[in-house]
């Protein structure tokens, strides 16, 4: 069952104050690296799964996409996206990604940022994505890295030397994790890297990219507060392509 956490007033208020909510893609530290996985946008038909405030949908249009379909479950997120968008080339649709039906051969690019780790039935959605892509079409996504989602108590801890360490237990025990992030009781699905990759391969897609993102030295010059992310990878990026036929 889908969790409408982004429509929770407390969660939404906290999420709206995050840098990536205030500044869009420029406020997402991982964006420059994730952007490198994207194909050329000129004339592309794009589906943005979990579009949120619509930042990527609008960026895709400015980069040359012919049309963008942004899909999200949250009423509050879509209201904000609609408010901030003045572009007939972008359409927003409210739908549950657990059950969404994507039109076959309708997209040159399917993109999803930090959404798939909320979904229970990943293989079904990946199959929908594979069918929606035209031959040669590309799927690019980011998810919370499995080392980030695995711990039963996902908080920094102190070791005997007083150093901060990130606990890693239950990595191979996939399933629901409940955390307090912006609001109590946020439910996420923990999966291994293998499970993500095999979902793509099982749908007939060809894996093209796998990136375990953490800050670079240049990132830390500008954002020294990100240094702790060197001790855990916060994000996993995957790129895949529908084999031409």
Image (cartoon, grey):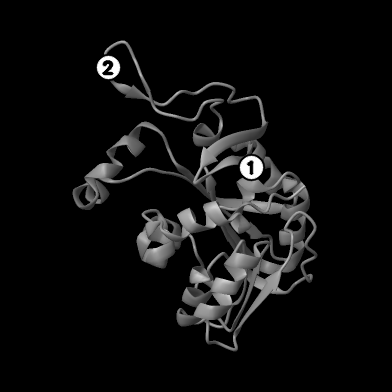
Numbered mark located on residue 224 in the image: none
Extreme residue toward the top, this view: 160
Query: Which labelled disc corresponds to residue 162?
Result: 2
- Residue 66, picture quadrant: bottom right
Circle 1 SS class? helix
Q: Nearer the viewer, mark 1 or mark 2?
A: 2
Position of residue 231 relative to residue 207, above or below, is above
- Residue 174 on image: x %, y %: 67, 30
- In the image: residue 1, left or right of residue 185: right
Residue 41 visible somewhere in the drawing:
no
Tag 2, which secondary structure?
loop
Residue at horizontal 73 percent and vertical 50 percent from the top: 2
Toward which corner of the image does residue 176 lie, by quadrant?
Answer: top right
Q: Is residue 159 left or right of residue 62?
A: left
Residue in the picture at 68% in, 48% down: 200
Q: Which residue is mark 1?
A: 196
Q: Earlier in the sequence, mark 1 or mark 2?
A: 2
In depth, the one of 202 and 175 nearer the eye is 175
Of 159 and 208, nearer the camera is 159
């Amino acid at each position: 069952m889908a969790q409408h956490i982004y429509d929770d007033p407390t969660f939404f208020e906290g999420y709206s104050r995050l840098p990536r909510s205030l500044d869009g893609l420029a406020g997402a530290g991982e964006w420059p690296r994730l952007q490198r996985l994207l194909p050329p946008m000129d004339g592309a038909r794009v589906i943005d799964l979990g579009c949120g405030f619509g930042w990527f949908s609008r960026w895709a249009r400015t980069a040359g996409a012919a049309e963008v379909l942004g899909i999200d479950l949250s009423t509050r997120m879509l209201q904000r996206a609609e408010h901030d968008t003045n572009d007939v080339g972008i359409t927003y649709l409210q739908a549950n990604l657990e059950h969404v039906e994507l039109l076959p051969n309708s997209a040159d690019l399917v993109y999803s940022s930090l959404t798939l780790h909320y979904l229970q039935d990943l293989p079904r959605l990946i199959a929908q994505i594979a069918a929606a892509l035209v031959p040669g079409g590309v799927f690019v996504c980011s998810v919370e890295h499995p080392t980030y989602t695995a711990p039963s108590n996902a908080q920094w801890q102190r070791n005997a030397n007083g150093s901060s360490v990130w606990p890693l237990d239950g990595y191979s025990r996939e399933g629901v994790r409940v955390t307090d992030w912006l609001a109590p009781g946020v439910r996420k699905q923990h999966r291994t890297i293998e499970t993500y990759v095999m979902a793509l391969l099982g749908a007939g897609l060809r894996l093209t990219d796998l990136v375990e993102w953490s800050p670079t030295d240049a990132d830390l010059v500008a954002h020294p507060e990100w240094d702790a992310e060197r001790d855990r990878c916060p994000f996993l990026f995957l790129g895949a392509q529908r084999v031409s036929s």
